[in-house]
Amino acid sequence: MDCNLFTWGDNQHGQLGDGSLAPRQTPELVGEVLGVVRAAAAEATAVVTKSGQLFAWGFGGRRSPAPVSLGGRRASSVAVAAQVLCCCTPDRELVVVRLGEVTEAWLAHDNIIHAAASRRCIVALAQALGSSGHKPPGN
């Protein structure tokens, strides 16, 4: 069974995925992404499909779903806040993605049983990354 994604509400950053910045009071289908099994939303939106593809929008001027590269990995769960998202892979790896004009992804940790990140946790991670002046490993 394919699962469809419907969005509504505030759309200040394009997080509804309809190509606009207009808010909506009623749910509408986000037609570009099919087979959604996980979704997370805040200032940005991210979804995982049945095949493990990750899509995100509502950041860096992106108002429609765009694929996010995880360096050949598949996603199994996702959490998002501000300009950072975290996802867990089926191989129990935690991948952190910094969202922006240029999207960066890197392996943060392996042997993770379940990624259940809270908004507060991801915001703290984003603040630490932003204030440290360090580049993610491998960049």
Image (cartoon, helix red, strand yellow):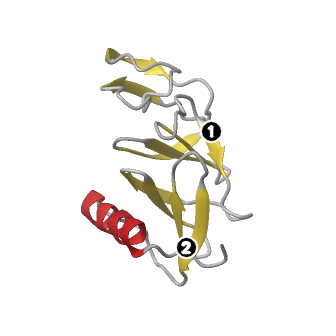
Q: How many dots with numbers?
A: 2
Helix, strand or loop at label 1? It is strand
Which of marks 1 and 2 precedes in the sequence? Answer: 1
Q: Nearer the viewer, mark 2 or mark 1?
A: 2
Alpha carbon separation for disc pair 2 and 1: 23 Å
Name which residue type carries label 1: Ala
Q: Which residue is mark 2?
A: 135
**Quadrant containing the N terminus in the rendered view:** top right
Q: Position of residue 14 (x, y in %)?
A: 44, 29
Task: Locate residue 13, reporting x and y percent.
Answer: 40, 32
Q: Where 133 falls versus 54 (above or below)?
A: below
Which residue is at a point 49% across and 31% down the rendered structure image? Answer: 5
Instruction: Evaluate whether residue 35 shows in this view.
Output: yes
Q: Position of residue 129 (x, y in %)?
A: 42, 70
- The residue lying at 51 percent from left, 58 percent from top is 98
- The residue pinned by badge 1 equals 66
Task: Give the vertical position of 43 relative to 136 (above or below).
Answer: above
Residue 93 visible in rendering: no
Q: Quadrant of residue 31?
A: top right
Quick one: label 1, few (<14), some, or many (20+) residues within 10 Å?
some
Q: How many C-alpha atoms fall within 10 Å of the one at disc 2: few (<14), some, or many (≥20)?
A: few
The amino acid sitting under disc 2 is Lys
